């Protein structure tokens, strides 16, 4: 029998989930000006600073003139990225005119931009108290909401943006920010509603519209509406064919929808946009490796995860995934070496450690090291998670060690602990405890429960194992041939003791390619 994890299950075991927002969408980032234009702007800004600094030395300036000059020099400092000096000018303007709405708004914007969110909120509140129009107040509530987002105070952000929308129902950015806050709280449908409204405000800005559609796709993924999400990502890419994040997140939606080939192609396209970001590039190679595992392309998966680890030597998930790919490829000893490295990163995660020790026990079983299989499975069991798989792995090893009573006890533990009563382990435990007909029934039902080709082939393989154990060679070979024809790795069958009863049949030798 072979362990089969869905790609989603592999991620879940490691404590890795697809966040509601997927990879962070790079929305509304300023477009880069040409180098010559930047130099020209910087020169003009410095000239402006010099001019106002000199003018402040003149006598007889009226207070309102000094207030205006401080705010104009502030703008020049902002171009020069001298934020402290820009703040000082705003503060000076406020000292001249404590009700200077423009000074409070400008300083709040600067504080927001440099992540001094609490100070930004305080300035927004003061500016609101001095503002005369609903439009200005709406913008301030929206700015306040952005600062709340930076502080992860999502409910307060929603309240602030809701107020902004009441004051100005056409303020598209308020809908966008509120959508982000809803998304962070897992309220994906509310986020989708706001994003759908915001889209109308950016019809003449295709790049921004592309980002909004991609973000709405993220929210639909959060609701498991994968086909709808894919449609939004595709619309996003029509507007901006260079939206690397949309390629990445569409690939994730394909993955979650079980379309491994399309996901693979999407990750491959996204890779081109992250060549200068080692950590993100490493994650993309690891994501693509998972798809290659799903496509039974284990050497390619190993190669991609090797690239990921070369880019990020502390990439925990890649160590786990390359270990799993090696195990699937029949490289059991090297798999366990990688699992041992993964332990360094998951030692405080009992669920991941249970999976790692269980997988190592599985590898030792296939190498014929049955006592080592027992020892690793016991380590997994001692972590006291709800995972019943280590009991199954240990039970099989006990059988090989002729400890039948201990084996039966562990098989009974699987039957007691596996509340789904539908897994392959559960079916095989039924067989070993004397109910082969029920085991076959459960395995047959498993074919109807999934459209995932990787899992389905694994289920065919395990059905072949079960029939072989029951000494039914004709049925066993039918299912073995079915999974091998779909591209299943032959290495497992060559080493799997479950096939000992049919190994010498002509059909088995033909399927595996033994002469």
Image: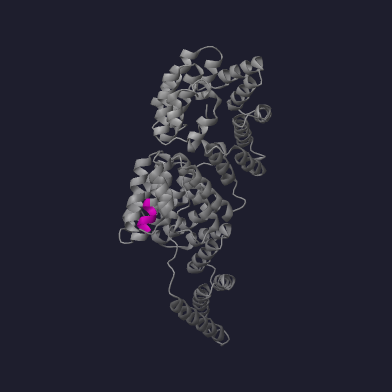
Q: Nearer the viewer, residue 158 or 339?
A: 339
Specify whether residue 486 is in view.
Answer: yes
Q: Residue at x 56, y 63 (%)?
A: 114
Farthest residue to the top: give it.
434
Point out residue 390 in the picture as x, y percentages from the top left corner.
61, 27
Query: Is residue 210 magenta-colored?
Result: yes
Point out residue 207 in the picture as x, y percentages from the top left corner.
36, 60
Point out residue 68 in the picture as x, y percentages from the top left corner.
49, 77
Q: Residue at x 61, y 15 (%)?
A: 408
Query: Is residue 205 magenta-colored?
Result: no
Q: Residue at x 55, y 41 (%)?
A: 326
Q: Nearer the viewer, residue 422 or 214?
A: 422
* Magenta segment main secondary structure: helix
Specify whether residue 190 is in view.
Answer: no
Q: Nearer the viewer, residue 208 or 68?
A: 208
Query: Which residues are drawn in magenta?
Result: 208-213
Q: How is the image coloured?
A: one colour
Point out residue 401 in the picture as x, y percentages from the top left corner.
66, 21
Mark count = 0
Q: Is residue 34 above or below residue 26?
A: below
Q: Is residue 100 above or below residue 297?
A: below
300 lies left or right of 387: left
139 lies left or right of 419: left
């Amino acid at each position: 029998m072979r362990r089969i994890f869905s790609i989603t299950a592999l991620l879940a075991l490691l404590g890795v989930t697809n966040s509601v927002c997927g990879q962070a969408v790079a929305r509304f980032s300023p477009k880069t000006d040409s180098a010559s234009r930047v130099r020209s702007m910087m020169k003009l800004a410095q000239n402006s600073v010099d001019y106002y600094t000199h003018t402040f030395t003149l006598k007889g300036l009226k207070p309102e003139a000094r207030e205006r000059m401080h705010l104009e020099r502030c703008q020049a400092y902002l171009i020069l990225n001298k934020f402290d000096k820009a703040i000082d000018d705003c503060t000076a303007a406020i000292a001249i005119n404590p009700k200077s709405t423009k000074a409070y708004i400008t300083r709040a914007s600067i504080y927001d931009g440099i992540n001094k969110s609490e100070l930004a909120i305080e300035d927004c509140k003061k500016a609101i108290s001095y503002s005369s129009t609903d439009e200005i107040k709406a913008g301030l509530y929206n700015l306040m909401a952005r600062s709340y987002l930076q502080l992860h105070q999502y409910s307060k952000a929603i309240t602030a943006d809701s107020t902004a929308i009441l004051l100005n129902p056409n303020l598209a950015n308020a809908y966008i920010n509120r959508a982000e806050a809803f998304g962070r709280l897992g309220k994906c449908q509310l986020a989708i509603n706001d994003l759908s409204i915001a889209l109308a405000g950016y019809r003449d800005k295709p790049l921004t519209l592309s980002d909004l559609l991609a973000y709405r796709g993220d929210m639909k993924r959060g609701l498991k509406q994968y086909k709808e999400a894919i449609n939004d990502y595709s619309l996003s890419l029509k507007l901006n064919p260079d939206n690397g994040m949309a390629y990445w997140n569409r690939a994730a939606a394909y993955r979650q929808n079980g379309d491994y080939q399309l996901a693979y192609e999407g990750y491959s396209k996204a890779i081109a946009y992250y060549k200068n970001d080692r950590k993100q590039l490493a994650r993309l190679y690891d994501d693509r490796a998972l798809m290659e595992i799903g496509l039974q392309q284990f050497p390619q998966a190993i190669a991609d995860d090797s690239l990921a680890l070369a880019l990020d030597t502390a990439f925990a998930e890649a160590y786990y995934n390359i270990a799993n790919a090696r195990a699937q490829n029949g490289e059991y000893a090297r798999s366990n070496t990688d699992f041992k490295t993964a332990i360094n990163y998951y030692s405080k995660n009992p669920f991941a450690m249970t999976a790692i020790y269980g997988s190592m026990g599985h590898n030792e079983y296939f190498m014929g090291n049955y006592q080592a299989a027992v020892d690793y499975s016991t380590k997994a069991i001692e972590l006291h998670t709800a995972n019943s798989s280590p009991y199954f792995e240990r039970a099989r090893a006990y059988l090989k060690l002729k400890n039948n009573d201990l084996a039966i006890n562990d098989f009974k533990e699987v039957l007691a602990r596996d509340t789904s009563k539908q897994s392959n382990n559960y079916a095989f435990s039924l067989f070993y405890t004397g109910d082969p007909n029920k085991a076959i029934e459960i395995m047959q039902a498993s074919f109807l429960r999934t459209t995932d080709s990787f899992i389905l082939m694994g289920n065919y393989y395990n059905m072949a194992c079960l029939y072989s154990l029951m000494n039914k060679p004709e049925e066993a070979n039918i299912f073995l041939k079915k999974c091998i024809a779909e591209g299943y790795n032959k290495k497992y069958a060559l080493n799997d003791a479950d096939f000992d009863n049919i190994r010498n049949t002509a059909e088995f030798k033909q399927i595996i390619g033994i002469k």
